[in-house]
Amino acid sequence: MGDVSRKSVAVKRRKFAREVGSVVLGVLIALLIGEVADWVRWQIRLRDGLQAMSGELSGNRFNFVERRLEQKCIESRLISIGKVLDRARQTGSLPAIGTIGFPAVRPSESTAFEVAKSEGLPLHMDRQRARDLAMLYVQMDAYNSAVSSEQNSWKTLQLLSGSERKVSDDFLIVLLQAWANASREGVVTGVLAQQGDDNFKRFGVTADFGEFHDLAGLAKKVSERQSCQPL
């Protein structure tokens, strides 16, 4: 009788162990499936985020390329404006001047990067890749800031346009200050464009030329702009 009882207990224990083992195994499998599913979801989000940032960066590199092509025109235009202002200081008059043009202004994009950061995607990237991406966007921000300051100076320089006229000393001072600022800011913007373009290229970012098709098409359009024509 005692043997039968012990066998019964042993059978119950084995049955219980199997049930517990099945439950534990089921939990482990569920956790593993959950982790795999979570990893797959992050990989999909990472892929989509990187694709969005790739397109965004291609458009941003275009801005650098365009500025590099236009840089000599801007420098030449500022030299011409400086000569006009120098003569105006001597004569007290400005000659008849048409439209002087503007350095090109293109909106840059960072929406995909901001969304990626808000979703924590950089935490799921290779660390060096995340740093490289952040650096490229920081360069774009610095360039945008320089362009914004430069444009304010060029807006003042638009006062040059008009018929031949006498000008006051105060008006000349305003124009000379704007010219000095535009000259300084033009150098900074040009350097940032060159550095940005070189770094974007180094990290494999290709420029999206859009309607201009390629570098030659863009170069042709830039050469036709007002800023590249004689003053």
Image: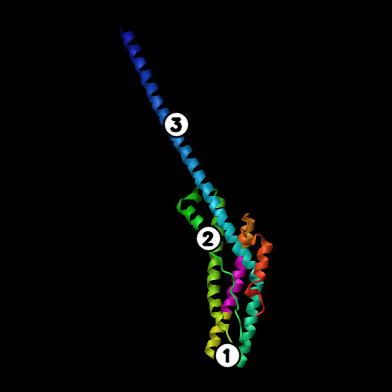
Q: CA distance from mark 3 to mark 1?
A: 86 Å
According to the picture, the residue beneath numbered tag 1 turns out to be 165
Please name the amino acid that badge 3 sits on: Ile
Residue indicated by mark 2: 109
Foreground: disc 2 or disc 1 = 1
Q: Earlier in the sequence, mark 2 or mark 3?
A: 3
Magenta segment: 180-195
Q: What's the amino acid at mark 2?
A: Glu
Depth check, front residue: 149 or 1: 149
Q: Amino acid at mark 1?
A: Arg
> In the rendering, which numbered label is found on residue 53?
none
The reply to whether dot 3 and dot 1 touch (C-beta < 8 Å) is no
In the displayed structure, would residue 158 be above or below residue 93? above
Q: Residue furthest left?
A: 1
* Callout 2 crowding tier (Cα within 10 Å): few <14, some 14–19, many ≥20: some
Marks 2 and 1 in Cβ contact (< 8 Å): no
**Alpha carbons under labels 2 and 1: distance apart:** 43 Å
Mark before the other along the chain sequence, 2 or 1: 2
| Location of mark 3 (residue) | 29
Numbered disc 2: secondary structure: loop
